[in-house]
Each structure stands twice: as C-alpha cells, then as structure tokens.
Amino acid sequence: MDSRPLRLVQIFVAMAIIGDMVALVVRGASDAVLFPRSLGGISSEPGNWLLVEWGAYTGPALWALVVVSLLFVILGVATRPALVVALISYAEFGHMYTPGDRGIDRILRTAMLILVFSAVSEAKWGEKVASWPSDLIRWLLVMVYLDAGWAKYKRASGWLEMQPFPELYEVMAAPNIGRWDPVMMAEYPWIFVAGGWYTFALEASALLLLTRFAPYWAVFGVFMHLGIAATMELGMFPFGMLALYPVLFAPWIAKWRPRSVPAEALRTPV
C-alpha cells in the first residue's frame, strides 16, 4: 500500500498525544500528576512503576521524553527509535497515575506498537510498504467501535428509545464532561434519540471498515467525533480516534499525488 496513510497516522497520533501532554500543563494539573503523593502530587511513588525511577524528577523527565520523542516522529527524524522511546515512556507515564490512563491512551499505544514494526518508518513519502499494519489498525478500530455499540445495545432503553431524558442528553448535560448546557433542548428528546441511533448505527456497522466501503463509513465517523469534540469534554479521545482514520481513507489518499512528488516516487519498488 501507499506509505502516506500510515505516515499520517504516525504524525497525527504524535500530535494528539503532544497536545494532551501540553494541555496537562496549560490547565495547571502538571504539579499534581507529575509528582508522587510524598511530594504533594497524586501519582504513585516511583517504586511502583515498571522500568524507570529517577526520584522526584521521574514525572517531569517522562513528560519530556514523551514530548521530545514524538516531535522526532513528527519530523521524521530517527522515527523508529523515537517511536520506541515514546511508546515506553508513554506507558510508564500511564503507570504514574493509573486512574488517568484512559482507554484512548491504550488504543494509541497499541497503534504505536504496530507502527514500530512497520516499514513506514524508513519508507519515503508515497513509497509502497506492506499493508499489514494498516489492516491491524483497522481491526483495532473495529473492536473499539463494536464494543462501544454492544455496550449501547445492552442499555438500549437509554440510548435508543424515546424518553424524557435520553442517555445522550444525560451525557451531554453531565457537569464533568459536558461542554454546554443542553437544558434549552430538553423539550426535544427526539434530537438526542436520533443522535444515539446515529452513533449506535455507526458502531454496530464497524465491520464495514474491513471492506471497500471503509472510506464512506469514515466520513460519518469524522462527523461523530467532531460532534463529540464540540459537545463533550473527553480530552484527546475524539482527536486520538481521528488520528487513526488515514488508514480508512487510504484508497482516496493513494489516488492523490501532490505536484511536488514525482510519479516515480509513488510506484511500487521492484
């Protein structure tokens, strides 16, 4: 396959994680998360982590390792070693404060692990590479969406049936994750039921990601995640998921050739 979709996944995953790490500082949570309880923070003591232990400086050092190594990934400099460093340090960072190690963190680490073994790290822009990493990332997305759809199916009365306060309304109105107060739309529950059906239909049909219809499915998925980003405060979740979408748009990306890239660069090497 064309290397560009996988290279874009590398770049977008790195951008999503860096943005999340910077947000940690901008929002004033760095002192709490980067330091253990003995130093006034909320993280575990260094002795409870897996690989590294640099005392009081462990948290800040891991933060810096994640950010710097992912900047190397974005720039395409020593990409494979940078991915390995980012993957290990990011996993260690998750052990600092395990309640803050979210599902999206583990999803992106899984994608990074796949990319470590991909030839895309050494491939030129547009060069042909083995497609198995793209297939694995697609399957990862299928599992994530099907699991989410199954969870909604088990709670069908909240997500899929008309009631005064549908589950989607409750989520959007929750003070810990809601970006805006939907009380003005409480008289129109059908809007939230329709949104619940839209989300459920996408997640339940995720097996289409393994077919030639994946790019068309992905268009609706983009709208879903942009809606999540606009109405809910779920950290980097919507952007982290969208970071994996270039593999879904791979057939369309392969048809596009920038003027600055000669046609010979996009041919399959002999």
Image: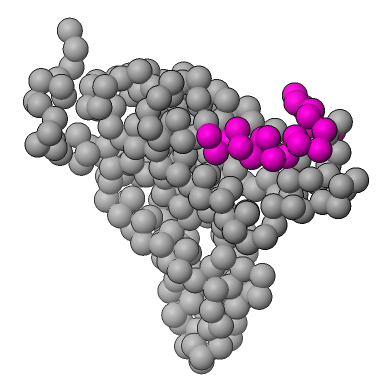
Q: Position of residue 192 (x, y in %)?
A: 48, 77
> In screen coordinates, is 189 left or right of 27?
left
Q: Position of residue 204 (x, y in %)?
A: 46, 53
In the image, what residue occupies the spot 56% across and 65% down?
233
In front: 61, or 179? 61
Indicate yes or no whether the magenta region holds residue 57: yes
> In screen coordinates, is 5 left or right of 264?
right
**Residue 139 visible (yes or no):** no
**Residue 40 visible (yes or no):** yes
Which quadrant of the figure has residue 88?
Answer: top right
In the image, what residue occupies the spot 9% across and 36% down?
259
Which quadrant of the figure has residue 12?
Answer: top left
Per the picture, the main secondary structure of the magenta-coloured stretch is: helix
Q: Can you say whether 122 is above or below 96 in the image?
A: above
Span of residues in magenta: 48-68
In front: 73, or 57? 57
Total numbered badges shown on the rendered structure: 0
